[in-house]
Amino acid sequence: ERLEENVRELAAKLENPLVLPCDVTSDQQIADLAATLDREFGGLDFAVHGAGFAPADALHNPFVETSRESFRIALDVSAYSLVGLTRAVAPLMEKRGGGSILTLTFIGSDRVYPNYNVMGVAKAALESSVRYLASDLGPKNIRVNAISAGAIKTLAASGIAGFSSILQVYRDRAPLRRSVETSEVADAATFLLSPASRAVTGEILMVDAGMHAIGL
């Protein structure tokens, strides 16, 4: 509810938008979402999964102090939700002869970033899920990929202490000497959701100004 106004403002820029609620920790709400989409559109061409969350204590405290409950919530919302959503929408994509599913990740899945903590572990699980889902759904012509974007100043990033210093590291050390813009991530997403990437699946596409290639 806190972000509903922002979502509706963004959706208003689309032609015939349909805005629906969905708590990704609820299998029933995910099923209801899929049923509504089926009823309204009779199928689905693509889906973008952008859900990620960890309790504040799990981001502010050292990783070793992560509670069992905070770990469970972070993995449920940030990783398992992709599995649940994919299972629900795959039949809708089959009706169209295939489709593309895309999620968003971050290099904190593979390397330690200050104050990213349990979200890094959740993103690692998310990326592994991408590969297993791609294997399961490939025979149905449904592709599953992820974009690993560079550091971007977003609402989600505001919850990570010291994020401005991470942005500065990108400006100083990334091969392009900058971070990335949301429009550049959107361009990559458009490619992965379109037929132009019809032979690409199980991929973690780095859109990070080349930062992933740098060691020191």
Image (cartoon, rainbow, N blue to C red):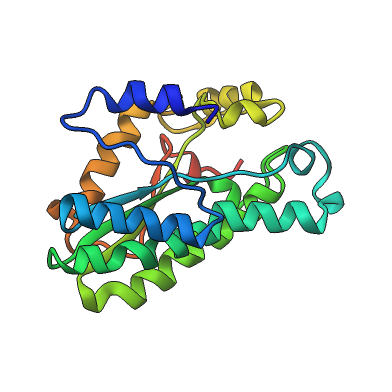
Q: Residue at x 52, y 42 (%)?
A: 214
Most foreground residue, 130 or 110: 130
Looking at the image, residue 212 lies above or below residue 27: above
In screen coordinates, is 190 left or right of 131?
left
Q: Position of residue 187 (x, y in %)?
A: 25, 36
Looking at the image, residue 201 lies above or below residue 206: below
Looking at this view, name the residue that lies furthest to the right: 65
In screen coordinates, is 15 left or right of 7?
left
Q: Position of residue 84 (x, y in %)?
A: 46, 63
Q: Position of residue 152 (x, y in %)?
A: 49, 28
Quarter of the figure with residue 114? top right
Q: How many marks?
A: 0
Looking at the image, residue 111 lies above or below residue 165: below
Q: Position of residue 94 (x, y in %)?
A: 19, 69
Most foreground residue, 153 or 86: 86
Most foreground residue, 96 or 102: 96
Q: Residue at x 66, y 30 (%)?
A: 159
Quadrant containing the C terminus is top right
Q: Residue at x 34, y 20 (%)?
A: 9
